[in-house]
Amino acid sequence: MATRQGFARSDRISEQIRRELAELLRFGLKDPRLSSHLSLVTITDVETTRDYSHAKIFFTSLSPAAATGEITAGLKRSAGFLRRELGKRIRLHKIPELHFVFDASVENGSRLSRLIDQAVESDVQRGSESLDE
């Protein structure tokens, strides 16, 4: 059921969780194992279950691909702290358990964009070569 604004309650809660987690990652998390990577982490989406018992947190990072596993592990280790802090900021009967998932869609989109640019450049070069003949 959507409200008059077009957003279901679960969408509003997911968005609020996304905003709060982004702020917590930026200012509240002091894990030295993650500190060099946190400024490069972006929360891209949050999906909550209907009963709000679980939230899947999608994130992306500008860190090298080799650091993705380290970042995921660090976020999973910090999930309890982040959940506790969310409980202080969000008024919900039940604060969801947080499950962090790397979101490769941004990386895939960037790769596809590069491939398209290369294909266009190749076509332009072939077109100019055929004009020279």
Image (cartoon, grey):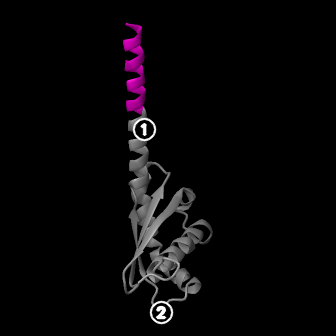
What residue sits 41% from the left and 30% below the top?
A: 120
Task: Name the outermost residue toward the top.
Answer: 133
* Element under disc 2: loop
Q: Is residue 26 left or right of residue 52?
A: right
What's drawn in magenta, residue-wise? 118-133
Q: Is residue 3 above or below residue 21?
A: below
Residue 35's x, y, as percent?
56, 61
* Element under disc 1: helix
Gap between marks 1 and 2 measured at Cα? 46 Å
Q: Nearer the viewer, mark 1 or mark 2?
A: 1
Residue 133's x, y, as percent?
37, 7
What residue sits 51% from the left and 82% below the top?
A: 4
Instruction: Using the image, tell me which numbered label, if any, was put on residue 93.
Output: 2
Residue where numbered disc 1 is placed: 114
Res 111 → quadrant:
top left
Res 117 → quadrant:
top left
Residue type, numbered disc 2: His
Q: Is residue 14 above or below residue 74?
A: below
- 127 or 67: which is nearer to us? 127
Work out whether residue 125 can be spotted.
yes
Res 88 → quadrant:
bottom right
- 18 or 27: which is nearer to us? 18
Q: Are marks 1 and 2 in contact (CB under 8 Å)?
A: no
Work out whether residue 30 can be spotted.
no
85 is within the stretch colored magenta = no
Q: Examine the residues drawn in magenta and state their main secondary structure.
A: helix
Q: Quarter of the image for the N terminus: give it.
A: bottom left
What residue sits 59% from the left and 70% below the top?
A: 23
